[in-house]
Image: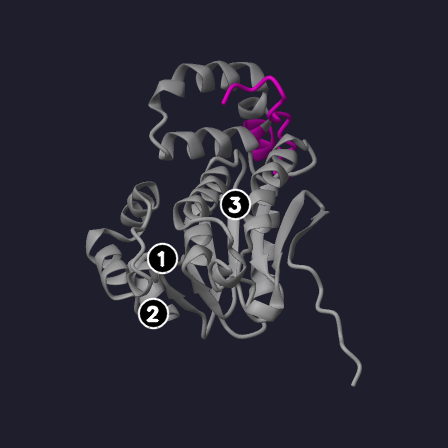
Amino acid sequence: MAHTELPEPRLRHTIDGGTATVVIDHPARRNAMTAAMWRALPPLLADLAADPAVGVLVLTGTGGTFCAGADISGLRASADEAQELAVRAEEALAAFPKPTLAAVRGFCVGGGCQLAAACDLRFAEEGASFGITPAKLGIVYPASSTRRLVSLVGPATAKYLLFSAELIGTERALRTGLVDEVLPTGELGKRVGEFARILLSRSRLTQAAAKEFAAGREDRAAYWADQARASGDTAEGVAAFLERRDPRFPWTAGPGTPP
C-alpha cells in the first residue's frame, strides 16, 4: 500500500489588494500550531507590518477549522518554553500596527483562541466552537493572555472559560463579546473580504492612532497629533466629503514610525 506524505505544517500568506491573509495550515491536526509555526509567526508579522502595500491582516485556518491549539504531540520543549513561544506570537499579533481580523470556522480552541483574542476583531461562521483549555492539562494560562481575555469578554466569562475548559458556541461567543459578527455557512469569506475593503478605504492614520489608544497608549497622543497635522488626511477627508467622492488618504506608516 502506497504511503502518502502529509504536507508539512506551516503558515501560508498571500497579499491581495492591500489585505494580507495568513493561513494556519496543519489540517492533519485541525490546524494545531507546532513549535516551528509559533516561532515563524512573529517574523512573518514583522515583514507584513513593514510592507506599505498591506493595510489589513486576516488570520484564518485552512479547511473547516481555525486552530485547535498547540500541537502538544510535536512539542519537545518544556511546558514553560512552549507557553513562551505562544505568548511571543500572541503579543506580536496584538502589536501589529494595522487592523487585524480573525476569520473563524470550526474549532478555535486553546492557543487558537489565544490568537483570535489577540486580533482586533473576530468574525465567525455559524457552528464555530471556542474554548480555552489549560485546566484540562494542569497548565497555568499566561497572565498577559488572561488580562487580554478579561478585557475582551469581562471577568465572569473569562473565569467560565478558564475554570471549566468548556467549549461555547457562536451564540454565546457573540453575546459575551468574544466574536463581533456571526455569519451563515458559506458567507464568512465574503463578509471578511468586504469588511477588509471597507477598512482599506478608511484613514490608516485614524486606525493606527485608535489602535494604540485602545491599547492604553495615551503617552502617544502628542505623536499622533503631530502626525495628524502633517498627514493631509483631514484635509483630504473633508474635501472628499464636500465633493461627494471617495477619499484617497495620503498617510501611511513609514519605517521611521516609533513603536
| Residue type marked 3 | Thr
Q: Residues within 10 Å of mark 2 (few under 14, many from 20)?
A: some
| Residue type marked 2 | Ile
| Residue type marked 1 | Leu
Label 2 close to label 1 by CB (< 8 Å): yes
Quick one: which residue is furthest to the bottom in this view? Answer: 1
Which image quarter: residue 7?
bottom right
Q: Which residue is mark 3?
A: 100
Give the colour scheme shown.
one colour
- On screen, residue 249 versus residue 183, left or right, reads right
Q: Position of residue 235 (x, y in %)?
A: 56, 22
Disc 2 to disc 3, C-alpha distance? 23 Å
Q: Which residue is mark 2?
A: 168
Q: Residue at x 50, y 43 (%)?
A: 89
N-term-proximal mark, 1 vs 3 = 3
Q: Residue at x 52, y 36 (%)?
A: 96
Label 2 close to label 3 by CB (< 8 Å): no
Considering the whole magenta stretch, tell me its main secondary structure: loop
Numbered range of the magenta stretch: 237-259
